[in-house]
Image (cartoon, grey):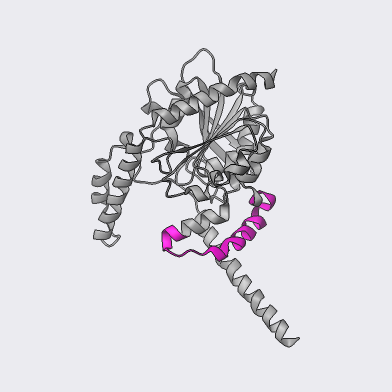
Amino acid sequence: MILILSVLFVLCILCGALFLTAHLILRRFFGVRCEGNPNVTYFQAEDFPGLQAKSVSFPSNRGQLLRGFIYSMDFPSYKGLIIFVHGMGGGHTAYMTEIHALAQEGYLVLGYDNTGTMLSDGAELGGFPQAFLDLRHAISFLRNSPLYRSYPLFLVGHSWGAYTVCNFPHLHENIQGVIALSAFDNMSSLLVRLIQNQTGKRLSFLKPFFLLSIFIDYRGLALYRPSYSLQEADCPVLILHGDHDPTVPLEESPLAHQEVLHQNSYIQTQICPDKGHNVYASVRAEQYMAQVFGSYEKLEKEYDQQLPPEIRLEYFEKVDFRRMTEEDPDVMSLISNFLNQCLPEAEEKIR
């Protein structure tokens, strides 16, 4: 009996230590604000001829203000309203080329920054599920607005944003269409992969402890997975993923569960050949981005991570950020066609 109790005590101590480790790792990722990459040029509305931006703000779950813009071209009427949900590393202005393209197609586009990101309030990001809460309040803001509530509503997201729109919440929200670009399927699995990319160590045994820590903070939202949620989707969904994505490889994508997804006739999927994580960008744009940041990492190593500011500035002044954000016309055409195909069904739903 004493032996059994001793073993149980040791196991409790071990589990406690693993939980604390997982919790500290999550705090490292999400216990900070994200102000974007200081070396990157984030385009604004004025960088695109004819693109208009109307400033908006709305409170999220704890009263923190989320800020962004309603983007549009000067058209007499609009087909619908798209909410664009950004990924990690920057706010919505990291996607201005895509937002401009969607606005050119005749849509209003709401781009906002998540909690703890760039324009928005919040001392920290919080965690992956925080984006669900922010999106819920973005939708509430639009549906309570006399200016915007009558428009057919679409969701578009990239990476973290794609994970968010795939699950929200199981799409029983009178959404007319959803586009997920480079989504991941499992939060804990992705965290293990991100740690491996940074440290070279694959700490798969931490998965249940990541899940527990997230569950303590966000309850049932911690359990969401697109491969489960999309089985209940009642609107058209388009999932695009690159077959060379180093950030979210195909085995981490909802597309690893094709046999499940295809049970729902609303879901369309496409694997894009030779594409990385920015599946909407051209192949040469992704290659250029990899070249720019790869060369910069080598430069930092030459200076033992103590690169003088003037050399850093000189390096990035030569970077062509237009070239880095060049779109893939075929992918953008696929997105545009999908949205337009959703419109007749959208009109039936709002009658």
Question: Which residue is nearer to you in this view: 237 or 65?
Answer: 237
The answer to whether 45 appears left or right of 152 in the picture is left
* Quadrant in the rendering for residue 11: bottom right
Majority secondary structure of the magenta segment?
Answer: helix
Give how far across and how far down residue 1 sits, in percent.
76, 86
- Rendered residue at 52%/61% (across/down): 25
* Quadrant in the rendering for residue 51: top left
Q: Residue furthest front?
A: 259
Question: Is residue 309 part of the magenta span, yes or no?
Answer: no
Q: Residue furthest top?
A: 76
Determine whether 311 is above or below 114 in the image: below
Which region is colored magenta?
A: 196-222
Question: Which residue is nearer to you in this view: 241 or 175?
Answer: 241
Give how far across and how far down residue 134 sits, in percent.
60, 41
- Rendered residue at 54%/14% (across/down): 77
Determine whether 273 is above or below 206 in the image: above
Give how far across and how far down residue 86 sits, in percent.
50, 40
Quarter of the picture holding the C terminus: top right
Question: Which residue is nearer to you in this view: 313 or 323?
Answer: 323
- Rendered residue at 24%/41% (across/down): 318
Number of numbered discs overlaid on the protein picture? 0
Give how far across and how far down residue 93 sits, in percent.
44, 36
> Do we see residue 31 in this rendering?
no
Question: Is residue 198 part of the magenta span, yes or no?
Answer: yes
- Rendered residue at 65%/33% (across/down): 140
> Do we see residue 351 in this rendering?
yes
Determine whether 7 is above or below 59 in the image: below
